[in-house]
Image: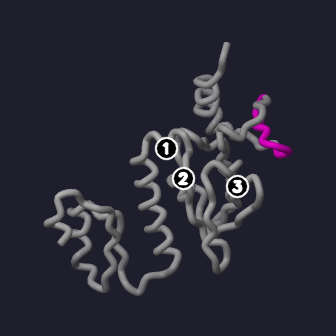
Amino acid sequence: LLKSIPKKPMVIFTTAYSEYALEGYELDVVDYLLKPITFERFIKAVNKVQARVTSGRQTSAAQGLDDFIFVKDGTKLVKIMINDILYVEGLKDYVTIHTKAQKVVSLQRLKSLEEQLPESLFIRIHNSFIVSLRAITSVHKNEVEIGNAFLPVGETYRKSFKEAIEKRQVE
């Protein structure tokens, strides 16, 4: 069926047969889930679709309109609006997403979440922090102020952070 459709939709294959995985990727499917499927693996596949949708909507992604992600918080999925995220804090296999109204702790790596967030709106400033450029209230020497939080800018990320800030600086 997928081969016969001229304009291909985003597809996640689910099957018990691993031998079809290669063909699935040749058809440019988003992901290939092998049964039995864990909930975490399913969420990762759904977030891949969301990332493709977000990157495909250049205008709305740049404006941050109606963009959201779902993250697992314990046994429930929590919808988080991209515009509400102030910063994300990573600690080993967990992330804490700090929003305007809440903190959501999710079992996933910071790198995985970083790949789902629009590059035009977020920047990594430290091994443990990703910040929303919109949420930054001030930049001190090697710290970023977001609300009442002061977050360190790691040495590895200083140059790219400085360049991102300078692009938006008015002389």
Q: Which residue is mark 1?
A: 60
| Front in this rendered view, residue 44 or 59 | 59
Residue 104: percent from left, percent from top: 71, 64
Q: Which residue is mark 3?
A: 89
Residue 54: percent from left, percent from top: 46, 51
Query: Can residue 128 be seen by looking at this rendering?
Result: no
Query: How far is mark 2 from mark 3, CA to CA?
Result: 20 Å
| Front in this rendered view, residue 28 or 83 | 83
Q: Which residue is mark 2?
A: 67
Q: Earlier in the sequence, mark 1 or mark 2?
A: 1
Query: How far is mark 1 from mark 2, CA to CA?
Result: 8 Å
Q: Residue at x 29, y 64 (%)?
A: 29
Instruction: Determine whether the residue tagged by mark 1 lies in a helix, strand or loop.
Output: helix
Looking at the rendered structure, which numbered label has been put on residue 156? none
Labels 1 and 2 touching (C-beta < 8 A): yes
Task: State the quadrant of the N terminus.
Answer: bottom left
Residue 73: percent from left, percent from top: 66, 72
Disc 2 marks a residue whose amino acid type is Asp
Q: Residue at x 35, y 67 (%)?
A: 31
Disc 1 marks a residue whose amino acid type is Ser
Q: Is residue 88 left or right of residue 10?
A: right
User: In the displayed structure, would residue 21 be above or below residue 170?
Assistant: below
Q: Residue at x 70, y 66 (%)?
A: 105
Q: Earlier in the sequence, mark 1 or mark 3?
A: 1
Disc 3 marks a residue whose amino acid type is Glu
What's the coloring here? one colour
Instruction: Determine whether the residue tagged by mark 2 lies in a helix, strand or loop.
Output: loop
